[in-house]
Image (cartoon, rainbow, N blue to C red):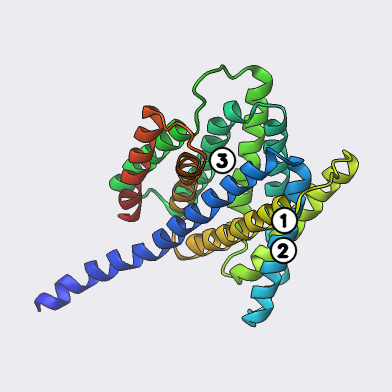
Amino acid sequence: MISSVVWPPRMAQSIQLVPTGFGVAAVLAWGTSDFLGGYASKRANAFFLTAISHAGALVLAIALALGTNAIVPPKASVLWALAAGACGGAALSLFYGALASGQMGLTAPVAALVGAAIPAVVGIATDGWPSKLALTGFALAAIGIWLIAKPENGKLHTEELAKAILAGVGFALFYILIKRAGDASAFWSAVSSRFAALVMVSGIVLVGRHVRKMDASHVGMGIAAGILDVSGTMLFIRATQTGRLDAAVMLTSMYPAITVLLARFFLAERLTGWKLLGMLAALAAVPLIAMR
């Protein structure tokens, strides 16, 4: 009698760990990818590096999809994934454009919050309100994202604000559209989205004549960043398939914390008190978001 009462809550709690685990793993992959890509882009053309990154990611995704004999998704799922990739590719190009013009530090926190807030609202509208603990986790995550990504100095002007909002909307659309791909294979969904992103960025490279010679080490970093990025994408897809969209987005949007930590340990960049506070807020948000 006692076991019949206790067992269901324990089962419910264990199930929540699955999407949370996928989300945390995506944070690690995306945060490391951004560190490698950001480091390499300081010594190479950002757009060309992004194209190389997408190409390496596409090769890996195709190899995994074919190697695991994953079921080819229906046409509708493929189209949703292609649309997601196009939006994500455009947003990433805009983001790297801000990096090239020296505005990345100002646009990052706004883009991160817009990219997380819109899917969170959509997730609540489609899946209903999460628990009060999860909402508290969402609030802590938003605070953490802002503190981790915000610049130490500078003001966000109208033009920069517009770029930040557009990039954030693009990232948000990627999250929402890839969720619409449904329960299709995460590998094939990654193939479709990465193909669309590669086409988008390659077009920008060719039109803008951004092709540049690159050292082998920078090419290697770009490919490694792409592999980690697409791995994060596949993990995010699994997080949305096994859990709520709003929770997956809020969790994975905390990836800048990994980038900041790697920069601290490998590049000796200063870790300010605000960023440390943001990381603590993000860390506290994870178990709260899992309790829904």
- Disc on the earlier residue, 2 or 3: 2
Residue 118 in picture, x, y percent from top left: 54, 41
Horizontal relation, residue 213 to residue 229: left or right: right
Residue 269 in picture, x, y percent from top left: 49, 34
Q: Is residue 192 visible?
A: no
Q: Amino acid at mark 3?
A: Gly
**Image point (59%, 19%), residue name:** 156
| Location of residue 75 by image quarter | bottom right
Q: Alpha-carbon neighbours of circle 2 within 10 Å: few (<14), some, or many (≥20)? A: many
Which residue is label 2 attached to?
Answer: 58
C-alpha gap between disc 2 and disc 3: 23 Å
- Residue 54 is tagged as 1
Please name which of the two marks, 3 or 1, marks the residue nearer to the observer: 1
Horizontal relation, residue 211 to residue 190: left or right: right
* Position above or below: 217 against 11: above
C-alpha gap between disc 3 and disc 1: 20 Å
Residue 277 in picture, x, y percent from top left: 34, 33
- Disc on the earlier residue, 3 or 1: 1
Provide the secondary structure element on which disc 2 rests.
helix
**Image point (63%, 54%), residue name:** 225
Whether label 2 touches label 3, CB < 8 Å: no
Residue 12 in picture, x, y percent from top left: 29, 66
* Position above or below: 6 against 200: below
Q: Alpha-carbon neighbours of circle 1 within 10 Å: few (<14), some, or many (≥20)? A: many
Whether label 3 touches label 1, CB < 8 Å: no
Horizontal relation, residue 61 to residue 22: left or right: right
**Image point (10%, 79%), residue name:** 1
Which residue is label 3 attached to?
Answer: 115
Whether label 1 touches label 2, CB < 8 Å: yes
